[in-house]
Amino acid sequence: MLILTDHDEFKQFTDEHLKRMNQKIVFDTRNIFPDFSEEVTYYHMGNLPD
């Protein structure tokens, strides 16, 4: 999953929402996701400029 915006819908995602992903990898460019379980590979890219 690649997150490029910080809409409120994305801020409410949990591990439950990612269960259907074959490869649980999240690239967060807006620093909006909470910490995930160890099953998810999480890359925080900081707040990239608009």
Image (cartoon, helix red, strand yellow):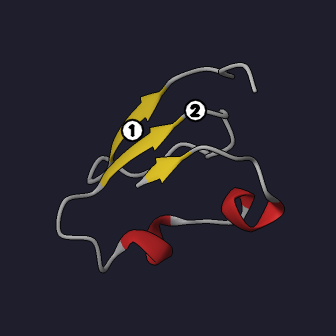
Q: Is residue 46 above or below residue 28?
A: above
Left or right position of 29 against 12: left
Residue type at mark 1: give it.
Tyr
Relative to 18, is 35 on the left or the right? right
Q: Nearer the viewer, residue 33 or 35?
A: 33
Query: Which one is nearer the viewer's eye here, 15 or 20?
Result: 20
Which circle marks residue 30 in the picture?
none
> With respect to residue 27, does 36 lie above or below?
below
Quarter of the image for residue 23 reads bottom left
Amino acid type at image mark 2: Thr
Q: Position of residue 13 (x, y in %)?
A: 61, 65
Give the position of the C terminus as an image quadrant.
top right
Indicate which disc residue 42 carries: 1
Residue at point 30% right, 80% down? 20
Q: Report the mark closest to the observer, 1 or 2.
A: 2
Identify the residue position indicated by label 2 in the image: 29
- Give the mark nearer the N terminus: 1 vs 2: 2
Question: Helix or strand or loop: what does disc 1 sit on?
Answer: strand
Residue occupying image coordinates x 65% and y 21%: 48
Please provide percent x and percent y for residue 25.
Answer: 30, 49
